[in-house]
Image (cartoon, grey):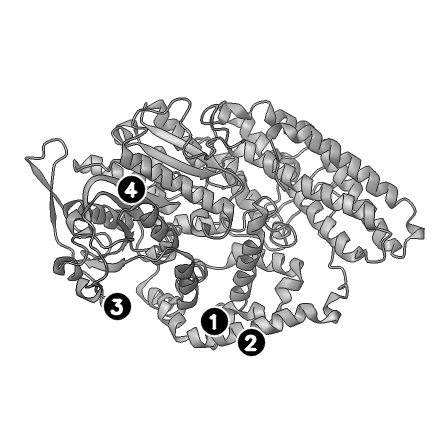
Amino acid sequence: MRVASDMDYRLVFSSLNEACDDTLASLSHPEDLPYGEVAERLATYVRQIQAHGSALEPLVASFTNVYHHYDFDEQTPGNGYRTLVKVLLSCLLHIIHKARYISSNIRGAFFRADHNAAELEAYLSALCQLRALLHLAQRLLNDTPCGELCSLQDVELSRRFVQEYSSMHKACFYGRCLGFQFSPALRPFLQTVVISMVSYGETYGKQQSGIGQAALSLLTSGKYVMDPEMRGAEFERITQNLDLQFWKSFWNLTESGLIAGFSRIASSPVQVNLTLSLPPVTLQLPLASDPGLSTNVSPPIAHWGPGPVLMRLISFEIREGQDSEELLSFCRTETRPISMSQLPWVQKQPLSPWLVVHFHGGGFVAQTSKSHENYLRNWSKELGVPVLSIDYSLSPEAPFPRALEECFYGYCWALKNCHLLGSTAERVCLAGDSAGGNLCITVSMKAISCGVRVPDGIMAAYPATLLTTHASPSRLLTSIDPLLPLGVLAKCLNAYTGEGRMGSEAVQRAAHRGSLSALGRDTALLLSDLTQGASNWIQSFLDPRRNMERPRPQSLVKNFSAPSLNHSGLSDTQDYPEGFAPLRSQCLAVINPTSCPILKNPFVSPLLASEQLLRGLPPVHIVASALDALLDDSVMFAKKLRAMEQPVTLTVVEDLPHGFLSLSQLTKETDVAMRVCVNRIREVFQGLNNEPTLENPPQQDGTQQNAGQ
């Protein structure tokens, strides 16, 4: 369900009251129904929903009156306050739909009373928690200057934000309500990710026959498919308490032979796909200010001294230089060198004037260029340009500044050796998503500081520009987001600063436990389990006994008229109105605060960089999502650059989660968002938008720049 516009809230609340009244009327004589006890529960839930709605409508009205002050500009409505209202209205629309279904079908012969009661109860729990988030956002609104989305000086706000996340019940957002705020086409994918994660987490750290068996245990049992409450509770436990190595190994499953194979099938075939290893030698580059002079660029040295820099070259067509002996001498052993003699029917193309240098996402702790290969192949085809993706070393084994050093070195090497990559590098664009977007900005800052050529533009998708746990309205979404929960985000940030760095023995154990070689050994077992497990899973739906209603789980909904104490002994009424308190979790999260001074380093958190460091950046094109917890990072950084009269554009796409580039083949919406990114890169190559973007950013190829359209 989609909220058409922000001003629809009055209609939504009116429809909610009408639907609740109709449902209560249909339940007014429970003695006439074959399930009187369930009818009484339904009536209780509906009354509580109405009470929440009555309290929320004036709160939503107060946000809609002011949240336009926090947008980037009039043409780009988008910020965390808008997003929280949008998510709440999405939840209410689901409740309205469910209430109308109940009132129309409750006396039908096929009405599943227990199922519908469980559905309504789940959305009631979600509504209660969203109400709590809106109250926290109201405190942010009151305690920060008008127009600012984050107060970096108010430590108490951030402490309270982390404290609330640690104790707030979140399982309801990972069960029946999973992904309700996103595009409906994405919900099956999100369910698959969550089920895979809890299945993998169930056997994580135990002696198993293989990673494939753990990752696909859902197919042999189906319990997390059939029991959303169990799935939600287990996912909450995993996101709050499992260590960083679990997340590294799970995210790296995207590079297994099976999943990577599916990705290649879905993406464009390319003629060049080489993995390169650069030796750590000093480079000599001309100074940007005076090309007659040169400067030395040293290889990466942080933490363990000089070492090779790994990268991947992708090109839709073979171009001059890409089959040269000089380039192939850098190929890693597993790469099959290309040879024009082996491809006599292929015509070698001339050097491209353009070059994309890419830095992948993954929270600085996981994934490689291989994980992002699906959309990089499409970029190379759409733009007709070679793409060089840097495989920087990952945290916590390689914390800051190792990744930045390797990305900067790879960028400089590409400038010096562009002829080997199939490009003249007349125009170079840095592109990256999430952590990679951060590195695009910081590599450019480092180029300015070192006096070497600055790229001609940056395309940063949903970049992380503030690597702290400071509170902002969009970051409140980390309490409900299945792809970016605060507990996981904090682990990644601490790892990048070095707080989570492991000793050598621990690194070896982690590498053994989550290695891709282990995945390779289990490929045969994984395929076998997939075939047999899928059969069992499908059979579980065909078995009529599985359609019998299960006993109702213990209710998570409490009477919200009674305030409670959280785990720190602080009354919930400190931030909430009298008579209301959010649901509390039985599984408390332990979050180490991001207090390391490194996080305030401008090359870690570019939002904190001085104007001197940021002045001279090339045009920055930011593509963010309205439902991303890091949306405010993008808005705040874009505002800062605009205030400096630096060239910047901000595009906010709708209904998609953080990481939508990796999902570009899944739905029409993600494909459109990927094309927005491609258009921004094309603008860099065509020299467009090189003036400061203060008002009326141009529309490209029919895409919508405005978040509210």
Disc 3 marks which amino acid? Glu
Q: Which residue is mark 2?
A: 532
| Residue 64 in the image: above or below residue 488 | above
Camera-nearest residue between 376 and 431 = 376
Q: CA distance from mark 2 to mark 1?
A: 13 Å
x%, y% of residue 58?
Answer: 68, 27
Name of the residue lying farthest toward the left:
292
**For residue 334, which numbered disc appears in the image?**
3
Q: Are marks 1 and 3 in contact (CB under 8 Å)?
A: no
Q: CA distance from mark 2 to mark 3?
A: 32 Å
Q: Which residue is mark 1?
A: 212
Q: CA distance from mark 4 to mark 3?
A: 27 Å
> In percent of the image, x 35 and y 42: which residue is there?
438
Q: Nearer the viewer, mark 1 or mark 3?
A: 3
Camera-nearest residue between 558 and 703 = 703
Left or right: where does residue 622 sit relative to residue 299? right
Element assignment for label 4: strand
Query: Quarter holding the C terminus?
Result: top right
